[in-house]
Each structure stands twice: as structure tokens, then as C-alpha cells.
Amino acid sequence: MTLIVETVFDLDALLTDEERAWRDKARAFATESILPVAEVDFENKHFRRELIGGLAAQGFLGMHIKGYGCAGAGAVSYGLVCHEIEAADSGWRTFVSVQGSLAMSAIAKHGSEEQKQEWLPRMAAGEAIGCFALTEPQGGSDPAAMTATARRDGDDWVIDGAKRWIGLASIADLAIVWAKDEEGVVRGFIVPTQTSGFEATPIAGKWAMRSSIQCDIRLDGVRVPASAQLPNARGLSAPFACLNEARFGIVWGAMGAARSCLEAAVQRSRTREVFGAPIGSRQLVQAKLADMFVEYEKGMLTAVHLGRLKERGALTPAQISVGKLNSVREALEIAHTSRALLAGDGITDEFPVMRHAANLEAVRTYEGTDEIHQLVIGRELTGLGAFA
Ligand code: TGC
């Protein structure tokens, strides 16, 4: 499928054949399997579980991890897959992120060899679903203030606490749970969700991400063996290393939602006639389209740059903050402008724009709000922290 917005800027020139192949595969899957059901599932708040097998068969789950049944693809390839899937719906890019960038990454980065062998191949195949339990009910911006605890009891660990906004938790087979030990050190645990004392409840009444699942979790004396602890996770930098992966995917994904909105506005501007001519022939409309397009391409160039840095092992958290802040902020702006150009029809499900705008409100908040990323960048520029 050729998109009008792709014919102008030739971003393809920056991609390798392999990257284009991943992109094309993801676009075909998103177009054939997600897009046809995106509106109805959003309307009905339906998580279409049967799509998981397709995502797994395409090799998208944990695709940046090497070995253990994972594709070992490059960062730009992974970003392009996030981009294409979120062009269909942010909820499904979120699924790919939670499974691959958060839950699988936690095991790949911090797990023992036995834990990797046990979980990663099944997770890559979509046979085991993971979730990542970090955020707590009092708020997500300051995970250092977490109150979930893990105490030793003989050879076991016993975990107590509450988590909130945890994607996929009610359908997950395992949860990566972050909790403080008796010394106040943050540790990570692989908790099978069937364990007694683990309870996940989907959050109702969402106006965003309606075709995906976010949950409250209660951890009530959840007992796991010592072998469930991630041995290489000590301190908050461990979950943050996973958040970096997910935030990187959002840099690309949000621009996918933006592209979908921009494409809708461009196509409409060519055909919709007002005052006897297509609205695309009017200067005010062209100015809006041009500004949206420029921000979209700037966002994509940033994404490619960050991807190349990541492939060299040189990507820093502050650089990811630049990308996450910019992509989501500009994607929202593009969605809102597109809605205005589509006029009354823009609020209907004839176009994907309101759905993307609503989803992007959630993307703006999770994995670090705009304000958190501004402060990360501000600290990098000034050398002065301004969080407290
Ligand atoms: P501070 O608490 O002082 O530092 C803790 C340690 O973490 C290190 N660190 C990082 N390491 C790697 N990558 C990063 N991006 C890191 N950011 C911090 C830091 O160096 C320190 O290491 P060490 O070894 O000295 O102990 O925190 P800070 O002052 O560095 O950072 C403060 C702040 C506000 C930037 C940070 O707390 C932050 O990023 N907050 C936002 C957290 C966030 O994104 N929460 C939303 C998570 S989304 C979610 O949970 C839902 S999962 C998705 C789903 O299920 O759908």
C-alpha cells in the first residue's frame, strides 16, 4: 500500500533492505488483521486475543532480543514495526511493547539463564503473556516511592502491595513484579499470575486504549521461590532499563498514529469540496497540511537517529526523552489538526482520527509524562535536577 505522505520525503532512503522488509511485513499485518477490527473493538472495548498468535508468527514479540526464539532484529527494524502497528491502533503497539520491551526485556536483561530458557521462547511464540508491574495507585512518575514489599521467608519471597495501570495483567501468565526488599532495594520477580494472592482487575471506563487491557493488581502475601527473583536486577535502574526500551518503541509508534491522521486529512483535502473547490486547494488548508507533514517527518528523522544511536549502543535516556516527548506531543497536535480539517465527519468512526487522539492521551501519560521528559531533558541541559 503506497501512502501519499510517503511519496514526498523518501524516508526509505535511510533504511536498509532488511528494515524495509520488517516494515512491509508489519504494515501488511496491521492493515489486514488489526485495521479492519480497530474501530469496532475500540467501540466495544474488546481485546481481540486471537491476534496474538499472528503477531508472534510474524516474529514481532521480543524481536530485538537475540536467541531464545527471538529474531534479534535491529533497533530501527523494531521501531518500524511499532510504527506500523500503532498506525492501526495504539492498543496493539502497547501489547507489543508490554510483551517484548517490558516483560521479555526484563527477563532478557536481568534474568538467569534458566529463567530465559523457561520463559522467553514461549513468550516469543505468544504462548505465554507477560505484564510489567511497576506503577502503583498513588502515581507512576516517582517509582522510587513504591510501597510494594518483598520479604524473605526461609527460601521464599513474600510480596505484598498494589499496582495500577498494568497492561495485560488480567490475561497474563506471568507478571514482572517490582518491590522493595527489607533494605529498601528494588528487586524484580517473575510471578506466575496463578500464584495465590495475585489478583488482577481490568480498569473500566477508559476513553483511551479501549481495545487493550490495563489493570489494577493486588499482591496479598504472594509467595514465590528464590528462583523467581531476577538475579541481575538491583535498584531502580533495572526497571528503568526496560522502560527505556518501551519509550524507544513509543518514539516510533506515536508517529505511526500521526501518519494515519495525516494521511486521512491529505486524502480528504483532495476530494472534499467546499465553496466549489476541493478544500486542499485553499491556502489555509495547505498551510495546516504542510505543518503537520513537517512535524511528522521531523519526528521520523528523530526516530531514525535514535535508532541508529541505539544500534551503536550509544543511546542515552535523555535522548529517548527527547524522542518520546516530541513524538507524542506532535502526534497529538497532528491528530487534533486532522480532526479539524475533517470537520464534522472527523468526530465519527468513518475516520480513525478521534480514536488515535484518544489513545495518544494515554500514550502521553504512560512511560513518563511530557513533564517528566521535559525535566529529564532540563536536567541534562542544566546539570540540575528539578523533580522534587
Ligand atoms: P532516581 O530515583 O534518583 O534514580 C534511580 C536510579 O535509576 C536510574 N535511572 C535510569 N536508569 C536507566 N534508564 C533511565 N531512564 C533511568 N532513569 C533513572 C538512576 O540513574 C538511578 O540509578 P542508581 O544506580 O544511581 O540508583 O531517579 P532519577 O532522578 O534518575 O529519575 C527521576 C525520574 C522522574 C526521571 C524517574 O523517576 C522517571 O523516569 N519517572 C517516570 C517513570 C515512568 O515512566 N513511569 C511510568 C511507567 S509506565 C508503567 O508502569 C506501565 S507499564 C506499561 C503497561 O503496562 O501498559
Image (cartoon, rainbow, N blue to C red):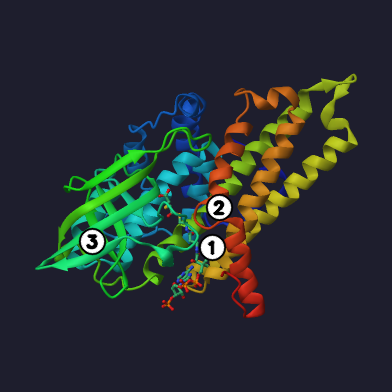
Q: From the image, tell me which residue sits under label 2.
A: 252
C-alpha separation, residue under disc 1 versus residue under disc 3: 25 Å
**For the residue carrying disc 1, how many other residues have a C-alpha within 10 Å: few (<14), some (14-19), or many (20+)?**
many
Q: Tell me the element at label 1.
A: helix
**Outermost residue to the bottom:** 383
Q: Is residue 14 visible?
A: no
Where is residue 347? Give x, y as percent. 66, 26
Question: Residue at point 50% right, 25% down?
Answer: 43
Asked if the residue at tag 2 contacts the one at tag 1, i.e. Cβ–Cβ closer than 8 Å, the answer is yes
Nearer to us: label 1 or label 3? 3
Location of the C terminus by quadrant is: bottom right
Give the camera-side residue of 166 and 319.
166
Q: Is residue 105 visible?
A: yes
Q: Quadrant of residue 201?
A: top left
In the rendered image of this protein, does residue 188 appear above or below residue 61? Answer: below
Q: From the image, tell me which residue sits under label 1.
A: 307
